[in-house]
Amino acid sequence: MNEEYVNEILDKLMKGELTEYYVKNEDFLSFRQIIVNREDFKHFRGIAKRGGDVLYRYLSEPRS
């Protein structure tokens, strides 16, 4: 996954154009590396799924 594509997905989550985004286990580390460097990092919630996949959602209130 390239950084431009990941940021496009994250922006769509932030704007409400997507309600959730499913990240496969093999893409998780590269996706996470980009998401943690964003200013709105605490607004994203990752929900672990079976096999190491993660489902991301955007929260209106940042998590603590």
Image (spheres, rainbow, N blue to C red):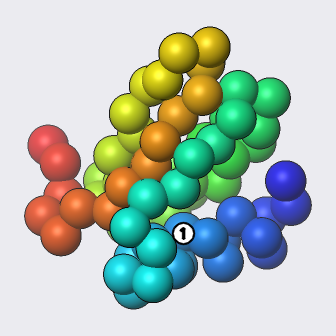
Residue 40, image quadrant: bottom left
- Nearest to the observer: residue 41 or residue 9: 9
**Residue 20 picture location, percent across and down:** 44, 59
**Residue 29 picture location, percent across and down:** 71, 33
Looking at the image, residue 10 sits to the left or right of residue 5; the answer is: left
Looking at the image, residue 29 sits to the left or right of residue 2; the answer is: left
**Residue 52 picture location, percent across and down:** 60, 18
Residue 3, image quadrant: bottom right
Q: Residue at x 47, y 42 (%)?
A: 55
Q: Check disc 1 and give the amino acid type.
A: Leu
Query: In the rendered image, is residue 19 in sight?
Result: yes
- Nearest to the observer: residue 49 or residue 10: 49
In the rendered view, tell whether residue 47 sits above or below residue 56: above
Looking at the image, residue 37 sits to the left or right of residue 17; the answer is: right
Q: Residue at x 14, y 43 (%)?
A: 64
Residue 60, image quadrant: bottom left
In the rendered view, tell whether residue 5 sits above or below residue 43: below
Q: Residue at x 70, y 64 (%)?
A: 6
Q: Residue at x 41, y 39 (%)?
A: 46
> In the rendered image, which residue does mark 1 sit on?
10
Looking at the image, residue 10 sits to the left or right of residue 58; the answer is: right
Which SS class for mark 1? helix
**Residue 5 picture location, percent across and down:** 77, 70
